Amino acid sequence: MFSLLLLALAAAGGATYLWAFLQWRQTRSTLLLFNLLVLGAAVLHALTGGAGHWAGPGAELRGYYVLPVLLATVALPASLFSFAGISRGSGFGWARIDWGHGAVDILAVALLIWSLPGILTIRTLAPACWHDVVWYLHSVPPPLFCPGHAPDVVLPPRPPVVPLVVMLAYLGLGAGLWWRQGWPWLLLGMGVGSILLLMPLTWGPLPRFAGEVLCAGVMVLAAVRHVRNQPPPAAPAAGSS
């Protein structure tokens, strides 16, 4: 039953992704593309978690995690480029200054470089089981050990530096958009999603999967709104070559 809920969550996220992808095809916006990658990683993660009940713990299911892990490793730092671009387009003073916008870009590159070695830790992923859900984690608490597949070594949890920075950045952006433009949805979505992401793992995987999809979904929604509000490109002057 819970696996089916994860698959339904992946389907809802996939529908949002398809809608936003059609928006991207019309605009070819790089800012929207970066956040689309984040949503794509969240949807693939939920889809893989939902399919774990049928795949079962093992090398096959762990292999399915390679794509969402790779995608998230690149997409999360890149979403800070979108954060800076949306902030500048929304008229926030710090983002309209070159050094302010540039500092965020440098931070995004630094976080990407810092997170790249995490790709090499895919082999350390261990199966976790909760009711009928089987998924993989870097650090599995004992209550979630799968029968017959307990890890030889329980690794300490990895500090979620990049997700935390992205979460705080978009919470701040959401607060700014609500204050300046009366658009509360980014702040509300990121707020609820952040609470879900912070829930204990022993409560089950559904809150965290839902938090990932919700946060990524409102990030995409904010990017689509930003792109739609941009003025159309100026037509070339008459007689110009």
Image (cartoon, rainbow, N blue to C red):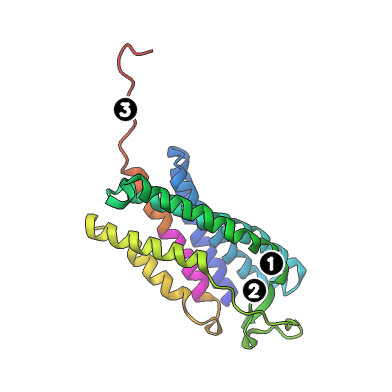
Q: Earlier in the sequence, mark 1 or mark 2?
A: 1
Q: Earlier in the sequence, mark 3 or mark 1?
A: 1
User: Is 184 situated left or right of 191 in this image?
Assistant: left
Helix, strand or loop: magenta stretch: helix
Q: Between residue 176 and residue 59, name the one nearer to us.
A: 176
Cα–Cα span, label 2 and label 3: 50 Å
Name the spot of residue 235 as percent of width and height, x first: 32, 24
| Residue at numbered disc 2 | 138
Q: Which residues are magenta?
A: 207-218
Of all residues, the one furthest to the front in this rendering is 99
Find residue 132 and report its image quarter.
bottom right
Few, some or many residues within 10 Å of mark 2 (<14, 14–19, 20+): some
What is the secondary structure assignment of the residue under circle 3?
Answer: loop
> Which quarter of the image is occupied by the C terminus?
top left
Q: Between residue 16 and residue 116, name the one nearer to us.
A: 116
| Residue at numbered disc 1 | 121
What is the secondary structure assignment of the residue under circle 2?
Answer: loop
Amino acid type at mark 1: Thr
- Mark on residue 234? 3
Amino acid type at mark 3: Ala
Q: Earlier in the sequence, mark 2 or mark 3?
A: 2
Query: Taking the image as drawn, is residue 80 in sight?
Result: yes
Residue located 29% across and 49% down the image: 90
Cα–Cα span, label 3 and label 1: 48 Å
